[in-house]
Amino acid sequence: MKDRLNAPIKYCAKHRGFYYTEPKYRIPAGFSGAEDLLALGMARSILSLYQNTPFYEAARNLLDCITAPIEAEGNRGWYENRIVVPSVPSAPIAPEIWVPLTTALRENRVVTFDYQGIWGGEHKPRRVRPYQLLFDTGVWYLYGFAEERNAVRVFSLPRMKNLALTNDRFSLPENFDYRADNGGSYFGVFAGQEKIQFCIDFYDESAMWVKERKWAEDQEIEDTEDGVVMTFTSTQYDKVLEWMLSRGCTAQPFAPKRLVSDWHRHIDGMRRLAKI
């Protein structure tokens, strides 16, 4: 490598091995395949989704360091303006929340913080055993065991303040992983206790929209005269309701009864707002 690539390498007699004298040196891009370069470029684009997270600068600097030889050789990717990850609405996370929280995850330490619920109101004290950080459409969440509730809960990081590490440690339970608690569906950050059977009809443009994606492990989609009918199970009731309502007049629920009732309730609410 020293002779063929002019790499800044020296021998260390003490450790009986070679080392880079320039820590930022990377193998020239000519020794990387086209697919590798494309993957690096796409990683830089995807990283933009995390721009309001404290680790963004460190991760960006690392990727810049890796791709520096590519750009130095005039191989700046064609993909930078051709393969784009559009920005999504995001919520900035303060370092005084992020740093101690990641420390708590690494060391299995209990944290305390003041938290504001989804409906607003005053911040209330919480004491939580942090299991995982979850990222969903621009927002970071803490998934952990809330001691005052004696149950697992999800907390939005932007609604936390006064977060502090305690010296109390905990052991992770075997079933700590959020991915095993979402009922095999993919509607974002939400996990309930009950697995529910859903049946929803979709019409017009929503029919194709639904068929293009994988929403749940056990989903079944059948064509009908007017569109498609989709059946699946999930523990993410609130997220499924939100997802279905987002399709407006091109989605109609048939099961469970609770979903049908909530659908009618939202329709009545919109009628009142529209004064119809």
Image (cartoon, grey):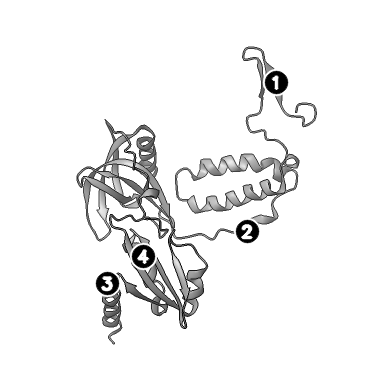
Mark 4, Cα crowd under 10 Å, few <14 / some 14-19 / many 20+, is many
Q: Is residue 194 left or right of residue 12?
A: left
Q: What residue is disc 2 on?
A: 83
Mark 2–mark 1 contact, CB under 8 Å?
no
Going by the numbered disc 3, the residue's amino acid type is Lys
Estimate the x, y position of residue 247 in percent, counting from the top left.
41, 74
Going by the numbered disc 4, the residue's amino acid type is Val
Question: Could you give the CA–CA distance between mark 2 and mark 4, rounded to whole angstroms?
Answer: 30 Å
Q: Secondary structure beneath disc 1?
A: strand
Question: Could you give the CA–CA distance between mark 2 and mark 3, rounded to whole angstroms?
Answer: 43 Å
Mark sitting earlier along the chain (1/3): 1
Question: Could you give the CA–CA distance between mark 4 and mark 1, rounded to whole angstroms?
Answer: 59 Å
Estimate the x, y position of residue 172 in percent, counting from the top left.
33, 36
Task: Give the label on residue 257, or none.
Answer: 3
Mark sitting earlier along the chain (2/4): 2
Residue at figure coordinates x 28%, y 57% from the top left: 194
Mark sitting earlier along the chain (3/4): 4
Estimate the x, y position of residue 103 in percent, counting from the top left.
38, 35
